[in-house]
């Protein structure tokens, strides 16, 4: 009995696959896979928009979008060839190139200024890195590198600050169990205000950690073999971001039933996020651009914590081709 | 008799109602940790508001759990039967089995996410959570059979496989079922853990991750309760099946035959040494083979040689060793304490289950919640109540360790044949005396088996606490290393934690063998 059933379902499945499979091949769009850095939220709004409006398809790309998560190390995904490009934290990427000999190139940067900052409560404010002395700060273990950079660049002894793990929940901060947490300043202040407190925050960027974030990283191999597709991806993504940031409150509500369905986050939160990140993304030479000055600043900040990056790790020539 | 059970049942329901009422009041009044524990009604209201979100997430979690549960259990029961038929095979794969059990899921989840795609990491983690429990239960069930029934089969000319079919497999059914009972929540937890880290779009773990940033305990508890419901239902299914089959397979009288030593004649020393060496080497060979088969590049995936190179041969080795040793010095002492605490807790519960069945029936739902409530969701609450010191580590460790040990111990106490219990009862012994003089000594093999089960979990519990709350030791080192893309350290921590667990396991096995042989009892595998 199971055999007949199997055969029937098998035949149906075969027919269905053929029906779906054929027209797709007729388009002959080049497949390209990107690995995002986190779950679906406003951080990736530009890509959602470009996918919805078919900007990638117009560029001849068949884009597969992979969401991230705490266990997903974006760099690992491109090393394992499960994605062509990844959005990464530049300090991690550059350390991997310089210390482990990973063959990466940074071809663009979504955030000109890293949105990561120290978030505290207004009633117990932490306004500068030196305020951290003697305080308890919750930091996601993967971001310890970045906080160590902040402390070292501001001449603060690592042992003077009590660093505990941060599990992405602002409850301990609001209840006063910790004094501050390391998080996206574009995101968590919204939650804190909803919980009846006012947030106080500063960007790490404004205190010497002059880094990009969500750097667009590829392997040298991909750069050589898929250069045209990568330029096309940058062009379509820039279009998506430009349109999304023109009025940051427009698109997030439209994705309530699609990109943001069931993420556990609210649309109001995404609008807040999208609005707050605008100034950190927009660049005079266009979104994703990496000016010589900004690259030099990144390298300088990293050198202060013993990460030796070089100008060769960045490839700005693709941006020029957009 | 019906009157007594009816009374018990109503008492249990009453206790449960009181418990829920207390929870509701405590939650509503925000008495615990400034409202971090929400009232039951607040959770239910939140669940109702979020009802549209759940079907997709529940569907994904159930799919991954069921697939993992099926695959893990088929492999586990098959392996269990093979191990009993060919005891050498069990010895040869013991290192591997313990290694599978002791693999810290927080360390292998990223590796699975990297090497497999789509649902596969979730299914694999669920299957890994199931395998050891069911495999052990199968072996226990197949080894603890009534030798008299086997003698009957042999007397009529039956060979080993016929004994297996007619006596051992039938006798093993209750054990396998009790294994499946513990395995079911494990599968759900494994799937949720992989979802939490793995970056998919659907699954309760993904939902939990997105919800963490809201600072809304009612949502987190809602997700936890749904996870508990799924796990609880699966547990219940096997508990019911188990209750229906147990009566028919339990011995009515006591077997007074002294068990044979091992499987007949002792093997010559060189052979035993070879098997031991094989058992120690096999996990490393399989580790190496896994990496070669998946074809993951060397930079990410370290073979055993890669780890040796990382720890001893490269320029950065001294620094890496120093970090590792410092972390071990923080983790190991608390693991030992945590293991004892978890085991004592399980033992007390098992005795209570015998003495106050009503209490334990009330407690079981609470115990199940602690097993299936994702610890990440509970951490803010635990940290707010217990701080970030030793006590939070101990409680997390107890919650991770006590349940399997408890189930095994209850089983050990329950399996004491009626005729043995009749003796103290005939002499008017109190329930305590009966427990102390008969049930507990008779359950000694199960206490040892529970200890062996607890050791690797204690290390895991401590590592989870370090990861989520204290930021020290191996658990923190593992996560920090991800930020440094220090793959060598990630593999090293995983390997070291597994090796430690296996070493503890053997230490307990050694003590167990001596004690039980001395008392003329069989070892429970």
Image (tube, coloured by chain):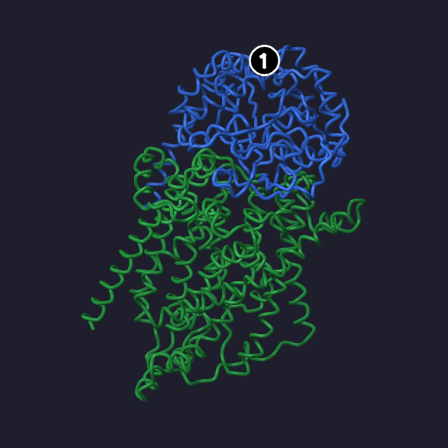
Identity of the residue drawn at 40% across and 20% down = A253
A124 sits left or right of A308 in the view: left
Residue A253 showing in the rendered view = yes
Q: What colour denotes chain A?
A: blue
A67 lies above or below A48: below
Q: Specify the quadrant of the image occupied by residue A4.
A: top left
Q: Nearer the viewer, residue A83 or B282?
A: A83
State which chain disc 1 sits on: A
Q: What colour denotes chain B?
A: green
Q: How many marks?
A: 1
**Residue A169, percent across and down?**
49, 38
**Direction left: furthest residue:** B3
Residue B226 showing in the rendered view = no
Which element is circle 1 on? helix
**Residue A100, percent across and down?**
74, 37
Identity of the residue drawn at 39% across and 39% down = B219
**Residue B467, percent across and down?**
57, 47
Identity of the residue drawn at 42% across and 74% down = B145
B190 lies above or below B257: above
B284 lies above or below A95: below
Q: Nearer the viewer, residue A302 or A198?
A: A198
Residue receiving disc 1: A235
**Direction front: furthest residue:** A123
Q: Specify the quadrant of the image occupied by residue A34.
A: top right
Q: Specify the quadrant of the image occupied by residue B257.
A: bottom left
B504 sits left or right of B53 in the view: right
How dense is the environment of label 1, judged by Cα within 10 Å: few (below 14), some, or many (20 and up)? many
- The quadrant the N terminus of chain B occupies is bottom left
Q: Nearer the viewer, residue B67 or B443?
A: B443
């Amino acid at each position: 009995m199971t055999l007949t059933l199997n055969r029937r379902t098998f035949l149906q499945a075969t027919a269905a696959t053929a029906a779906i499979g054929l027209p797709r091949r007729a388009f002959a769009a080049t497949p390209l896979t990107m690995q995002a850095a986190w779950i679906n939220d406003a951080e990736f709004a530009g890509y959602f928009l470009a996918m919805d409006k078919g900007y990638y398809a117009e560029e001849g790309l068949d884009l597969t979008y992979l969401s991230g998560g705490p266990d997903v190390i974006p760099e690992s995904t491109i090393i394992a060839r499960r994605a062509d490009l990844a959005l990464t934290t530049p300090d991690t990427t550059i350390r991997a190139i310089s210390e482990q000999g990973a063959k990466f190139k940074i071809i663009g940067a979504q955030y000109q200024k890293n949105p990561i900052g120290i978030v505290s409560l207004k009633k117990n404010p932490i306004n500068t890195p030196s305020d951290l002395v003697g305080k308890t700060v919750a930091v996601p273990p993967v971001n310890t590198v970045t906080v160590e950079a902040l402390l070292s660049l501001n001449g603060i002894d690592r042992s003077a600050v009590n660093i505990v793990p941060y599990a992405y929940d602002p409850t301990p901060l609001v209840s006063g169990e910790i004094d501050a947490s390391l998080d996206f300043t574009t995101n968590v202040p919204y939650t804190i205000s909803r919980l009846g407190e006012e947030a106080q925050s500063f960007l790490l960027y404004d205190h010497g950690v002059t880094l990009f974030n969500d750097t667009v990283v590829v392997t040298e191999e991909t750069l050589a073999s898929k250069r045209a597709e990568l330029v096309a991806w940058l062009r379509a993504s820039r279009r998506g971001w430009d349109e999304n940031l023109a009025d940051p409150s427009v698109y997030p509500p439209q994705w309530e039933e699609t990109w943001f369905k069931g993420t556990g986050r609210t649309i109001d939160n995404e609008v807040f996020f999208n609005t707050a990140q605008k100034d950190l993304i927009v660049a005079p030479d266009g979104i994703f651009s990496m000016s010589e000055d900004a690259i030099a600043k990144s390298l300088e900040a990293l050198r202060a914590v013993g990460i030796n990056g070089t100008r060769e790790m960045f490839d700005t020539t693709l941006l020029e081709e957009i | 008799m019906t009157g007594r059970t009816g009374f018990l049942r109503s008492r249990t329901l009453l206790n449960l109602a009181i418990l829920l009422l207390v929870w509701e009041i405590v939650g509503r009044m925000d008495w615990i940790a400034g409202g971090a524990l929400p009232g039951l009604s607040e959770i239910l209201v939140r669940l109702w508001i979020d009802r549209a979100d759940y079907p997709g997430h529940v569907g994904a979690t159930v799919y991954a759990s069921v697939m993992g549960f099926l695959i893990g259990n088929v492999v586990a029961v098959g392996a269990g039967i093979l191990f009993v038929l060919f005891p050498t095979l069990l010895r040869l794969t013991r290192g591997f089995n313990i290694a599978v059990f002791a693999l810290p899921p927080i360390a292998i989840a990223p590796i699975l996410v990297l090497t497999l795609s789509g649902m596969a990491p979730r299914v694999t983690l669920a299957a890994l959570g199931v395998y050891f429990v069911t495999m052990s239960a199968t072996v226990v069930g197949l080894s603890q059979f009534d030798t008299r029934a086997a003698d009957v089969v042999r007397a009529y000319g039956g060979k080993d496989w016929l004994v297996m079919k007619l006596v051992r497999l039938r006798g093993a059914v209750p054990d396998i079922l009790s294994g499946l009972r513990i395995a079911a929540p494990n599968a759900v937890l494994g799937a949720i853990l992989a979802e939490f880290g793995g970056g998919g779009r659907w699954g309760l773990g993904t939902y939990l991750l997105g919800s963490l940033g809201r600072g809304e305990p009612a949502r987190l508890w809602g997700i936890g309760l749904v996870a508990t419901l799924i796990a609880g239902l699966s547990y219940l299914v096997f508990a019911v099946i188990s209750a229906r089959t147990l009566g028919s397979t339990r011995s009515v009288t006591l077997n007074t035959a002294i068990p044979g030593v091992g499987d007949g004649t002792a093997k010559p020393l060189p052979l035993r040494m070879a098997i031991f060496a094989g058992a120690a080497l096999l996990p490393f060979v399989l580790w190496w083979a896994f990496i070669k088969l998946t074809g993951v590049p060397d930079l990410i995936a370290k073979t055993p040689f890669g780890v040796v190179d990382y720890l001893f041969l490269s320029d950065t080795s001294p620094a890496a060793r120093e970090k590792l040793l410092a972390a071990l010095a923080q983790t190991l002492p608390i693991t030992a304490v945590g293991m004892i605490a978890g085991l004592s807790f399980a033992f007390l519960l098992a005795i209570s289950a015998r003495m106050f069945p009503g209490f334990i029936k009330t407690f079981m739902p609470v115990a199940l919640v602690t097993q299936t409530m994702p610890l990440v969701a509970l951490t803010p609450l635990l940290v707010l109540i217990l701080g970030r010191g030793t006590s939070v580590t101990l409680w997390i460790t107890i919650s991770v360790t006590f349940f399997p040990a408890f189930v095994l111990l209850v089983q050990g106490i329950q399996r004491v044949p009626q005729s043995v219990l009749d003796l103290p009862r005939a002499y008017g012994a109190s329930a305590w005396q009966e427990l102390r003089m008969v049930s507990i000594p008779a359950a000694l093999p199960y206490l040892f088996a529970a200890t062996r089960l607890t050791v690797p979990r204690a290390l895991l519990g401590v590592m989870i606490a370090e990861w989520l709350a204290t930021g020290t030791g191996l658990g923190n080192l593992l996560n920090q290393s991800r930020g440094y893309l220090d793959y060598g350290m990630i593999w090293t921590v995983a390997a070291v934690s597994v090796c430690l667990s296996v070493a503890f396991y053997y230490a307990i096995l050694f003590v167990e063998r001596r004690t039980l042989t001395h008392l003329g009892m069989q070892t429970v595998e």
